Amino acid sequence: MSDPATHTLPPVPDRGGNGPLLLEATDLHTYYGASHILHGVDFRIRKGEAVALMGRNGMGKTTLIKCLLGIVRPRRGRVLVRGDDYSREPTYRTALRGIAYVPEGRGIFPNLSVRENLLMAARPGVDGQRAWTFERVMATFPRLGERIGNGGWQLSGGEQQMLTIGRALMTNPDLLILDEATEGLAPLIAREIWRIVREIRNTGIATVIVDKNHSAVTTITDRAVILVKGQVVFDGSSEAVRNSPDLIHKHLGV
């Protein structure tokens, strides 16, 4: 049976692999107390590329994302942003280099209106680009336009997720990181989120996507990285994952 979240979405043409490196991590070792979470992880993403970050729960995906953003400090290893070492830089400096984050749990400002949530994040991109304006976000998320004066707390889960993605786009990023963007959403709403992510991808913004819907995430990305117990066990084409039931069963438990 086809997945209701993806059955109308053919694979996105591969656009990644040849652009300049936006973000690169080498030999990351990360601990929470005495627990060793990431074990020598290497990760990279280039301009315009889309990468699926995959793995069962508790394998280190969110920890890796937080290391890339400077939220969690690695005990060993380096994170390079556009070739510069950002391993010890504060998170806001990483964000100012054109990296936007849509976290699991959304993180909107519930007491601000939809308009205020969007406008508070507005800024030009690294090269001064202003492709993502308030008007363009409204056109991409018409459902938000219908709720423009509502407080964040008045929105449904799907609308909150759209608002979080729209707010990230208002920073005009070169890289958008989405952590479980469709978690807990009804299938029809999840399908709308995938349509939006695909549209964003088609504008040339690089994306890192974490999602349990393996069919959807490998359809919309160029490359897949699979983590098992904090180690990279696969780094290759998303098509190879999509066409390998044995690989999916072995590492993702599906």
Image (cartoon, rainbow, N blue to C red):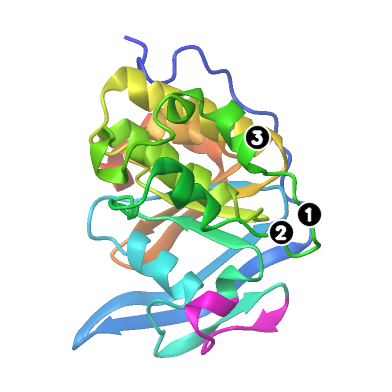
- Magenta part of the chain: 83-93
Q: Residue at x 73, y 54 (%)?
A: 47
Residue 129 is labelled as: 1
Q: Quadrant of the N terminus?
A: top left
Q: Earlier in the sequence, mark 2 or mark 1?
A: 2
1 horizontally vs 162: left or right: left
Is residue 232 left or right of 204 when viewed as pictured? left
Is label 2 in contact with label 3 (beta carbons under 8 Å)? Answer: no
Residue 101 appears in the picture as rendered: yes
The residue that disc 2 covers is: 124
Is 244 one of the magenta-colored residues?
Answer: no
Q: How many marks?
A: 3
Label 1 vs 3, first from the N-terminus: 1
Q: Residue at x 79, y 52 (%)?
A: 18
Q: Could you tell me the amino acid type at mark 1?
A: Gln
Which residue occupies the foreground of this view, 177 or 170? Answer: 170
Quadrant of the rendered image containing residue 33: bottom left
Q: Amino acid at mark 3?
A: Arg
Image height check: is 67 above or below 55? Answer: below
Residue in front for this viewpoint, 243 or 88: 88
